[in-house]
Image (cartoon, rainbow, N blue to C red):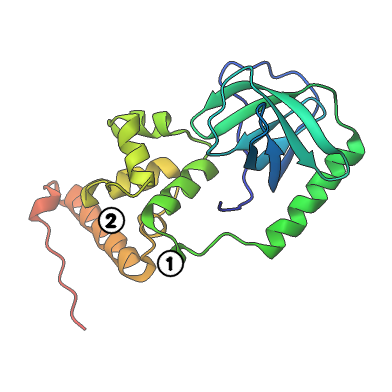
Amino acid sequence: MAISGYFLPAAPGADARGSARRKLSLPAEGTQNGGGGIKVLIHNISESGLLLESDVDLSAGDRIEIDLPHAGDSSATVVWVSDRLIGCRFDAPVSQAALSAAQLRSAVTHDEEPVPSAEDEAFGARLHRLRVRAGLNQAEVADRMGVSAPSVSGWEKGRARPKHGRMAALADILGVQASELLGDHAPEELHDLIDRSRRQIALAMGTSEAKVRIIIEL
């Protein structure tokens, strides 16, 4: 599971009150109701709850135990689930010492296991990482792209990819350059420059982009 330093908000409409949350990127292990082991990535934590990311199938009302530094197994109840994100409320408040220990462990882990470079990632994994970093779920990306949520899920799982002409729009939604989304920095940066120049020339001349041709002599 990719590890990176980002913060995701509470579920839409959630009560904003409560103890202060600490931003994390901490891999952890836990158990479900039935005793099955799970692996999660903790994104933020407070005395009263935490936000997880995991592939495990959980629903609101499920109870889990998460192994926290300095606190050991801490019981929590799932409050909401959105795609891979899981909001949980601790059954009993955790101590400030446990929160500090989790934050410290997150910093150490982040130093030891940096996010893989774009060149080392498949497109689907890269899209997932950038989407989560942007604080968006699959449904939100789908709505902005004018596609279905299963389509975005298929992109992230490697079953399909958006058409090349729509990559720029997807990159804008994620707040990155198309080159970062595609993992092809040098060629795509040049492609972005040419496209941007073509749009500017077309606007200045009052014509369409299709009528603008750019020739590069080396």
Amino acid at circle 2: Arg
18 in relation to 137, above or below: above
Q: Nearer the viewer, residue 159 or 139?
A: 159
Q: Which residue matches tag 2?
A: 196
Image point (75%, 18%), residue name:
17
At a point 65% along the width and 62% down the height, the residue shown is 113
For mark 1, does the 10 Å Cα neighbourhood hold few (<14), some (14 to 19), or many (20 or more) residues? few
Q: Callout 1, which amino acid?
A: Glu
The location of residue 70, given as percent across then percent down, is 88, 44
Mark 2, Cα crowd under 10 Å, few <14 / some 14-19 / many 20+, is few
User: At 74% across and 26% down in the image, what residue appears?
Assistant: 76
Q: Position of residue 60 (x, y in %)?
A: 59, 18
Tell me: 212 left or right of 14.
Answer: left
Does residue 37 appear anywhere in the picture? Answer: yes
SS of the residue under disc 2: helix
- Residue at 60%, 35% in the rendered image: 8
Spatial distance from mark 2 to mark 1, Cα to Cα? 24 Å
Place residue 184 in its image quadrant. bottom left
* Mark positioned earlier in the residue sequence (2 or 1): 1
Q: Is residue 139 left or right of residue 161?
A: right
User: Mark 2 or mark 1, which is nearer to you?
Assistant: 1
Q: Quadrant of the C terminus?
A: bottom left
Q: Secondary structure at mark 1?
A: helix
Q: Where residue 38 sits in the image (x, y, percent)?
A: 63, 40
Give the side of residue 80 with respect to residue 42, left or right: left
Residue placed under numbered mark 1 in the picture:
119
> Does residue 25 appear in the picture of this structure?
no
